[in-house]
Image (cartoon, rainbow, N blue to C red):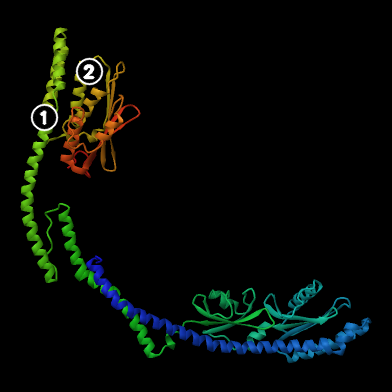
Amino acid sequence: MKIETFKRKILGVLFRILFPIILLLLFYNFYSIHIYNDKIEQSNRTRLIIYQNQIQKKIKNVETFVAEIVANNYSFQQLVNTENSLDAYTGAWEVMQSLKSNLAMQEEVGGYVLYNKDKKVEQAVFIKGFTYDTQLKIRKYVTSSLEKSEGLSKEWHILDVGSKPVLYRILGRNETYIISFIDMEKCSLAMEKGNDVSRITFCTSLNQAIVEKDYINKNQISFDYDNDNIVFSGKPRHMVIGEKIQNTDLSLKMMISNSGYISNLNHVQLILMIVSLLTILIIPISIWWIEKYITSPLKKLMDTMERIKEGHTEEKMEDDFGIIEYRRVSDTFNTMIYEIKKFKIEAYENEIEKKRAQLQYLQLQIRPHFFLNCLKIIYARVECQKYQQIQEMILAISQHIRYNFKDNLSLVPLQLELEHIKNYIRIQQLSTSYTIEYDISIASKFYEFKIPTLTLETFVENSFKYGMKPGVGLMLKIEATETKGKLHIRIEDNGTGFPEDMLNIINGDMENIYSDQYVGIANVKKRIKLIYGEKASIYFYNSNHGAAVEIVFQITEGEEGDQG
C-alpha cells in the first residue's frame, strides 16, 4: 500500500473529481474555437477565391490579347519579318495603336512596351498613374532583361519600382517582344476595401507583401507559410489564409483579425466557457480552504512533535483549533508529554551520575610514570646540589599535580590549559639535556573558550614520549583557527609521526581500548564524546614535519569564549 501525506491524499481526491470536469469543459471550449475558426476560414476563403478568379481572368484577358497580336496581327508580322526600316516603323506604329486602344478598355493594365533591339524599336504607352521617372525605370529593367535573355517564361513576374508595383509578362518571337504591365495598386483597389476585421494583400514567392505594408508591419504579420494552411500570426493575432494566383509568382493573402471570437458564441457556449473558467478557480480556492482548516493545523501538530523529538521538551501543542478532533489530540498529547518529561528528568539524573563515574574511572587510568620520573630527577639534582633547579621543579610539579586533580566534569578556559602545557614543558626542559622549543599561535579571542582539562596536555605528553629524536631535540607547535563556526586546535611536532597501523586504530572509535600505548588518547576521545557528543571530534594524521593532532569544537553563535 502506497503511503502518502494527508494533504496529498485530500488533494488527490479533489483533483480526481475536478480534473475530468475541467478537461471536458476545456475540450468543448477548444472545439468551439476550432469550429469558429473553420467557419471564419471558409467564409473568407470563399471571398478570397472570388478575388483570385477575378484577377486571374483579367490577367488571362491581357495575356490572350497580346498573344493574339503576336500570332495573328499583320502589323506585328510586318515588324518581325521586314528588313525595311520604314516598314518596321509603320508596323510598330500600328501595333502601338492597337495597344493604346486596349489600354483604354482594360482598367487594371498599366502599360505596354514594344521592343526590338536590332530594328531599334522601343515604344511604350502607360496610363496617367505612372510618372515619367517610373516609366524610365520600368523600360530600363525590361530592356536589360531582354538583352540578357531573362524574363522569358510562361509566368507573370512582379516588378517593384519605388512605390509602383507592377506585374509584367514578356511575349513575342524573333527578337520582337510586347511587354504587358498590370498595375497591382489598381487590382487591389478593385477588390473589396479592407476594414478593421480583414485586409487583403499580394505576396511574392519570397513572402514579401506588395500592398498594405504599413498595416502588416504595424501588426508584425508574417507570411512564411503555405497557402493551404490556416496560420495565426502577428500582434494582435490574425488568421492568415492564401490562394496562389495562377501563372504568376504571387499569392493573394487575407489577414483576418481574431478578436471577434466571444461575440460569435451563442448563449450556451458562453455560459459553458464561464463555467469552465470558474471551475478552474475552484482548485486554488479548495487548496486554500484545505490548507487553512485541515493541513495547516495538522502541520502545527506535526511541527510540535518534531521539535519535541529533537529535544525541545518544553514545547506544547496549541489548543485553539477550530476542529474538535484536533483539540482532543492536542490535550491528550500535552498530558502525555508532561508524564514523559517526569520520567526523562529522572533518567537524565541517573545518566549524569553514570557519566561522572565513568569519567572518574578514566581519570584514574592515567598511570603515574611521569611523577615517578620527576622524583628520580629531583633525587639526581639533590646529589648534584642543584638546589635552585630543585626549587623550580618542585613548584612546577606542584602546579602540575594541582591541575591534574581538577574535577573531571569541569571545563576550563583554553588559556588555563595552555598555561598548564607551558608548565609541563618547563618540567621537561629541567629534566633533560635535549633542546625543547615550542610555538603557541592562538589569538586572545579564543582564550576564554572552555575545554575539558588535560585535553591538549595528553597529546603534548605523547610528543615527548614518541617524538624526541636523538641529537635533534623537540619542536612543538600549537595553533588555533576558526572556520565556518568551528574552532580548530592543532598540535604538531617534528618527530617521526604516527605508524600507519596506529593511525587506523586511533582514528577509529577506540571503544574499550585502554592498553598502555593508547590509554591517554582513548581517555581524551572518550571524555570528549561523553561531554560533547557529535559536536566535537579529533583527527590524527602525519604532516610534513611529524605527527599532528587536530581537535575541532563547535563554537556557539555570537560567543567565541563559551561553547554553551
Q: Could you say which quadrant of the image residue 428 lies in?
A: top left
The kind of residue tagged 1 is: Leu
Q: Could you say which quadrant of the image residue 272 lies in?
A: bottom left
The kind of residue tagged 2 is: Gln
Rendered image: mark on residue 364: 1
Residue 89 falls left or right of residue 179: right
Q: Which residue is mark 2?
A: 429
Tell me the crowding category of disc 2: few under 14, some 14 to 19, or many 20 or more residues within 10 angstroms, Cα based: some
Q: Which residue is nearer to you in this view: 477 or 441?
A: 477
Which residue is rendered at x = 29% and y = 43% of the image? 484
Q: Can residue 401 be seen from the camera position used here?
A: yes
How many marks overall?
Answer: 2
Which residue is rendered at x = 33% and y = 26% of the image? 545
The image position of residue 74, as x and y in percent, is 87, 89
Tell me the crowding category of disc 1: few under 14, some 14 to 19, or many 20 or more residues within 10 angstroms, Cα based: few
N-terminal label among 1 and 2: 1
Q: Are marks 1 and 2 in contact (CB under 8 Å)?
A: no
Secondary structure under the numbered disc 1 in the rendered image: helix
Secondary structure under the numbered disc 2 in the rendered image: helix
Rendered image: mark on residue 377: none
Marks 1 and 2, how far apart at CA: 26 Å
Q: Can residue 489 be seen from the camera position used here?
A: no
Given the current orientation, which residue lies at the most extreme top position? 384
Residue 433 falls left or right of residue 385: right
Relative to 34, say whether 141 is above or below. Answer: above
Relative to 310, say whether 151 is above or below. Answer: below
